[in-house]
């Protein structure tokens, strides 16, 4: 296991693993993250996991950067299967009225709509990181047949719930925002659970799968989301 | 209901609390006052915890009607504060009663002013900074018991010389660009805001390397493909894919918060 520890300002260290987009490397990120979590009560301010790195922000009044570095180097972070291997099954309606780039993509990728949906719903995706927007999950890798560039000109507004493609990644916009991902569908599920004390359920390290739904089911879920009766427990799957 | 009524919102006014560490892993900007030092001073002078919620005003202050009796302190940039048309000093505890009006004339130094109030500014549950709009009412909580006097932090120096520390990708900078980093003047572009300051300068060059997106912190100098620097501020994103060619430490971010768009800055090595 290769690991490089870099200073990043006066109160943070950046731990870099092998710089490749791979579940094995990402497992190392989350193993270290879990091992450090207990220090949250003490000197640890916050952790930001990403594809192949972990940012450790510490309170310099409580610990020195050399001490944090020593701790990281000597921490037993077993690269076992993560304890928190949670999978979420996200319903997506791939209607062209939601998937604004769907029809253009079928042409450039030389796939039928059915094939594109099949390619997108088949894999189980790793959530490599959350960022860009609050709760936006960066997920990969997509089927090689779906590899696509970002839009040359970003949209002024991408609707909340939009599911997009960029490079070999897929993501979901938790809120409406300008954005350059190629939009192929929309989920009626609210990624930001603002009624909950803790508003996020998809977290870095989790697994996500997509299930294609028809317009009727999209409307049904939307109605129960608006009424506040939809429970995300229904999306939680084993393994 | 006891509140502050924003008759005019000013250029960019917002409520700011302590940075939200616990949500950083979910992509929520840390946020908090741009000049944390000035905000802490206002709170300390009022005998409140240093990171109690404050109001932040930018360049042009708001017009606020008090719909409650409060005590408050202003600190940071001098935006020409008046209470019922009479000027008053920063960093003094001011009493305002029902119907009094706080207004501002023009900025004579710095960029951002902080207002600490002796009644809790009730939290806004949005995840990111919300700009206060005309007609907004901020509800005040019950007066908090005064805590023991805090140590008042020293004020933020109004200096364009900004401390710089190396970032994870500083080694990617070409030698000439590394030298240039400390020898050129950077103009803060008009489009700069709480998310990032865009700097105008002769382009800098780094070795081409495909980077996997990774964590970024406030203060980070991101080198854009154009060769320009985007310097992330308090509302900056948490993950980015550009080379991080340096980071301005906490005290430098406070200094930057008081630099106006159009002004120039320089970096000085402080490692």
Image (spheres, coloured by chain):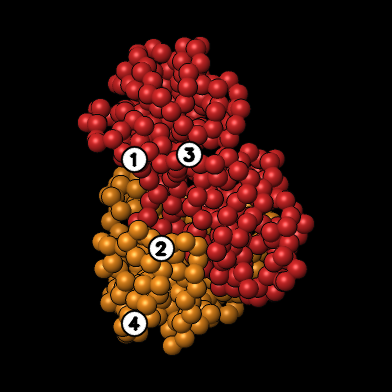
Chain colours: A orange, B red
Q: Earlier in the sequence, mark 2 or mark 4?
A: 2
The residue lying furthest to the right in this view is: B202
Residues at marks 1 and 2, CA–CA distance in whole angstroms = 25 Å
Residue drawn at (35%, 36%), measured in percent from left and top? Answer: B44
Alpha carbon of mark 3 to alpha carbon of mark 1: how far? Answer: 12 Å
Q: Which mark is residue B135?
A: none
Total number of numbered discs in the rendering = 4
On the image, the x and y values in percent for residue B50 come to 35, 41
How packed is label 3: few (under 14 Cα within 10 Å), some, or many (20 or more)?
Answer: some
Percent position of residue B250, x then y: 48, 52
Distance between the Cα atoms at labels 2 and 4?
18 Å
Q: Secondary structure at mark 3?
A: loop
Q: Looking at this view, name the residue that lies furthest to the bottom.
A: A1
**Looking at this rendering, what residue extends furthest in the left direction?**
B145
Which residue is label 1 attached to? B151
Q: Is the same chain shared between marks 1 and 2?
A: no
SS for dot 4: helix
Q: Which residue is mark 3?
A: B155
Camera-side residue of B146 and B205: B146
Residue B22 horizontal/vertical position (percent): 35, 56
**Residue B170, x across and y down, in percent:** 62, 69
For label 2, the residue is A57
Please name the residue that numbered disc 4 is placed on: A74
């Amino acid at each position: 296991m290769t690991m490089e520890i870099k200073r990043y300002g006066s109160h943070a260290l950046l731990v870099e693993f092998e710089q490749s987009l791979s579940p094995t490397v990402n497992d190392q990120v989350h193993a270290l993250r879990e091992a450090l979590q207990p220090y949250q009560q003490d000197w640890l301010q916050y952790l930001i996991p990403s594809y192949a790195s972990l940012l450790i922000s510490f309170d310099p009044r409580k610990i020195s950067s050399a001490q944090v570095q020593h701790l990281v180097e000597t921490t037993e972070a077993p690269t076992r299967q993560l304890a928190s291997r949670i999978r979420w099954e996200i319903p997506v309606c791939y209607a062209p009225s939601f998937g604004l780039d769907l029809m253009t993509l079928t042409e450039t990728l030389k796939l039928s709509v059915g094939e594109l949906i099949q390619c997108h719903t088949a894999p189980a995706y790793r959530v490599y990181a959350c960022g860009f927007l609050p709760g936006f999950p960066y997920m990969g890798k997509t089927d090689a047949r779906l590899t696509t560039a970002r839009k040359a000109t970003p949209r002024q507004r991408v609707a909340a719930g939009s599911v997009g493609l960029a490079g070999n990644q897929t993501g979901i916009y938790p809120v409406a925002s300008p954005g350059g991902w190629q939009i192929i569908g929309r989920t009626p599920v609210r990624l930001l659970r603002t009624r909950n004390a803790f508003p996020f359920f998809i977290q870095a390290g989790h697994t996500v799968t997509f299930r294609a739904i028809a317009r009727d089911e999209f409307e049904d879920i939307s109605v129960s989301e608006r009424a506040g009766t939809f429970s995300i427990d229904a999306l939680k799957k084993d393994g | 209901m006891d509140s502050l009524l924003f008759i005019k919102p000013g250029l960019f006014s917002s409520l700011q609390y302590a940075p939200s560490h616990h949500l950083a892993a979910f992509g929520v900007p840390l946020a908090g006052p741009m000049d944390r030092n000035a905000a802490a001073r206002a709170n300390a002078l009022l005998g409140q915890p240093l990171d109690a919620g404050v109001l932040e005003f930018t360049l042009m202050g708001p017009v606020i009607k008090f719909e409650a009796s409060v005590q408050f302190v202003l600190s940071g940039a001098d935006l020409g504060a008046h209470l019922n048309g009479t000027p008053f000093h920063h960093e003094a505890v001011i009493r305002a009663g029902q119907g009094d009006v706080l207004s501002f004339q023009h900025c004579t130094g710095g960029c951002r002013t902080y207002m600490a109030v002796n009644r809790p500014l009730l939290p806004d549950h949005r995840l990111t900074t919300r700009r206060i709009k005309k007609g907004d009412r901020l509800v005040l909580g019950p007066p908090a018991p005064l805590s023991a006097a805090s140590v008042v932090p020293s004020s933020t120096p109004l200096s364009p010389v900004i401390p710089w520390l190396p970032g994870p990708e500083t080694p990617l900078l070409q030698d000439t660009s590394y030298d240039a980093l400390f020898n050129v003047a950077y103009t803060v572009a008009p489009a700069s805001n709480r998310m990032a300051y865009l700097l105008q300068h002769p382009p800098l060059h780094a070795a081409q390397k495909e980077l996997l997106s990774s964590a970024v912190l406030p203060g980070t100098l991101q080198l854009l493909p154009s060769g320009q620097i985007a310097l992330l501020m308090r509302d900056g994103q948490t993950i980015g894919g550009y080379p991080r060619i340096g980071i301005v430490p906490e005290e430098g971010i406070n200094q930057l918060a008081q630099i106006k768009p159009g002004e120039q800055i320089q970096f000085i090595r402080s490692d």
